[in-house]
Image (cartoon, rainbow, N blue to C red):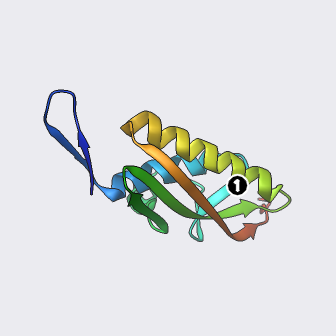
Amino acid sequence: MTELKTEGGGMVFIADDVLATIAGVAALEAEGVTGLAGNFSSAVGSRAMRKHIAKGISVSMAGKKVNLALSITAKMGAKLHEVSAEVQQRVKTAIETMTGLDVAEVNIRVGAVAAEVSQA
C-alpha cells in the first residue's frame, strides 16, 4: 500500500494492485504487446481481463519512488527493444499522471513472442 500526503493534510492510500492495474493497461496499449505474464489479451476491455491484468506485475517502493517489473508477450517480428522502451514510457507516464508518484524503474521481461493467427 502506497501512502501519499495530500495538500489538505489528509492521507491517501493507493493499493499496489491499483498501481499494477494502471501499469498493465498502459503496457497493453503499446504497439507490439499481445499480452502480460503469458496471458494473451484479445479483449483488453473485458471484465475477466481487467480482473487479472495485475497478475505478473510486481510493484515495490524505494523511498518515495515506485519500481515496477512487468513480463510481456510481444508480437512476432516486433523490435523487442523498441517495444520494451515504449512500454516503459507508457507505464511511467500513466503511473505518474494518475497518482502523482515518481517512477524510478520500469523493468521489462519479454517472456514470450506470439505469432499472429490468421482466421479463415
* Occupied quadrant, residue 20: bottom left
Residue projecting furthest to the front: 63
Q: Quadrant of residue 78?
A: bottom right
Q: Which residue is mark 1?
A: 84
Q: 12 left or right of 25?
A: left
Side (left or right) of 54 relative to 69: left
On screen, 6 above or below 104?
A: above
Callout 1 crowding tier (Cα within 10 Å): few <14, some 14–19, many ≥20: many
Quadrant, the C terminus: bottom right
Residue 77 location, x and y as percent? 86, 59
Closer to the camera, 39 or 46? Answer: 39
Residue 50: x and y in percent read 42, 54
Whether residue 104 is visible to the viewer of this picture, yes or no, is yes
Residue 116 position in % (x across, y down): 78, 61
Point out the image quarter for the N terminus: bottom left
Q: Residue at x 44, y 48 (%)?
A: 22
Q: Is residue 104 left or right of residue 40?
A: left
Say which residue appears at 52% left-offset and 51% top-offset: 104
Q: Residue at x 54, y 38 (%)?
A: 93
The amino acid type, in three-letter code, at marker 1 is Ser
